[in-house]
Amino acid sequence: MANETNVTSVKPNTIEGWVKLLDGVRLPVPQSSHDRVCRAIANNRSSMRDIADLMQDSPALALSVIREANQHTHGSMTEPAENLEVALNRLGLKRTEVLLARLPAQPDGDIPKALRHLQMISQHATQQANGFFAGRLARLWQDIHWGSLLFLSPLWPMALAHPQLLEEWELRVIHKGERASKVERQLFGVSLLKICEAMVNQWRLPIWVQQGYRLLLSEQRELVKVLRIARDSEHPLRQQNRLDDDPTLRRWLNQPANTVLLANGLALSAQQAWDSPHSERWQYLTSLYLQMSMDEVQQQLHQQAAISARHHAMPDLWHPAQSLIWPWGTRRVHSGLLPAAAPNTDDLAHWRKQCAQLLAEPSRFSNAMHLTTAARDALVACGMRRVMLLMIDRNQTHLRVHSHAGLPAETASLKIPVGKSTVLQRLLAQQAQVRLTPANNAQFSALLPASLRGLFGGEHLLLRSLVNNDRVVMLVVADQGGGPFSEITVQAFGKTAQCIERALHSFTNRSH
């Protein structure tokens, strides 16, 4: 892990490229967990079990330790560490301390939301696994627990490097019902499951995690057969007879490793709704695996979700347990389909303060970068989550990024050609504003450079040109995460643009 960096690169489109990128992402660890573990290691009375128990509060920390232990033994005859305690014993306290010193520790609220949300789903899956399977397979509880927690871990660095891709995948595949293979070719270049499988092999994660991805990729025929039997849940005797008639399929179903996949299927599908077809498939399979009635499965499923919410829920994250009090059949709308929250009184006060700095006379800005940074901060203050300010180069052929917020670090070096984009040409010819919505998104997106559109996933976007002395000098691109705008924020965006134009005028006409 010594070659890890915090910098994301241009989006890959091959499995090898994704493995290189994701393997190099350093996952942040909650500062509170980091401090507790460091104190425990420094305490001579702490056992390895004590330290492992403390580490469980941070999925990223647990993954980092298991990865380090397994990479250290890579190429040897040693089997991968299947759980955290084994990994700690292999590393020893000294090397664990060195690893902890390398990991970025941040306050919970500073860790990106997309990463925290995925890790919460993994923790929910672990709770489901412990509730449904660990008691029945008591000797295998460690394998069940750690396999369930780490199953989605290949996606954790993706949530840091390219969160907008995962968000768009969820919107299009889960909520709009588009074919996953088509969407994944467009977004990732390759199958998302194959990227995950490659990361599992790269990190030498527990064998049950590997088996879960192999099942999804290579054993779909068996999965379909079992699902057909599972749907006949009202006739358990007939189900049993059909399995008895096919001993190979019965052995395939009863593999203990399947518990990891079932738990993650239950937790992940619950993000949309408890009674969606996707969720019901995993409930049927769990019912057949455990030979429980569907009523019992659903009752226990909801109980474990409530326990998970008590332990893992955060105020700004969606947990499926929240919908258990809703009328049955209600669907959660994808976050990108609801209008963004309107700014509150404090938000508007902060925004007005930012605009006042832009309007100060005489100009307070020492150079153009100073001004564009203040302009960016004002746009963020009005409620925009992703912002880019661009200026045309001397040859009038490319736009260069002068400042940005909420976008990957490499955005700063982006050069966007304008020659083939009629939308950009129109915006640069005179003052104008273009607002993308679901109604016109397809039309306008086709007229924007892919390098620009790829950074702003979703169907809602604002582009506005800013003028100074009757000439367009800057282009602003902004959104609220790709979902519908708050109309108050749209109005504030327009007023902010006017403030930036006045700041540009004062800056260029200041006395020297």
Image (cartoon, rainbow, N blue to C red):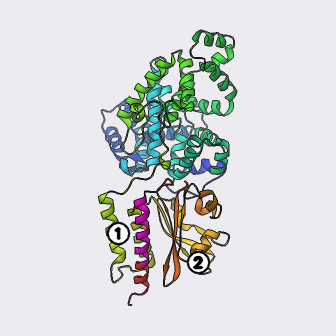
Circle 2: residue type: Ala
Tell which circle, 1 or 2, labels the residue nearer the N-terminal end.
1
Q: In the image, which disc is placed on residue 429?
A: 2
Q: In the image, which disc is placed on residue 354?
A: 1
Q: Residue at x 51, y 28 (%)?
A: 263
Q: Residue at x 63, y 57 (%)?
A: 442
x, y percent for residue 16: 65, 48
In this rendering, is residue 205 above or below 1? above
For residue 211, what is the image quadrant? Answer: top right
The quarter of the rendered structure image containing the C terminus is: bottom left
Residue placed most toward the observer, 143 or 350: 350
In this rendering, is residue 395 above or below 495? below
x, y percent for residue 220: 67, 29
x, y percent for residue 355: 35, 71
Circle 1: residue type: Gln
Disc 1, SS = helix
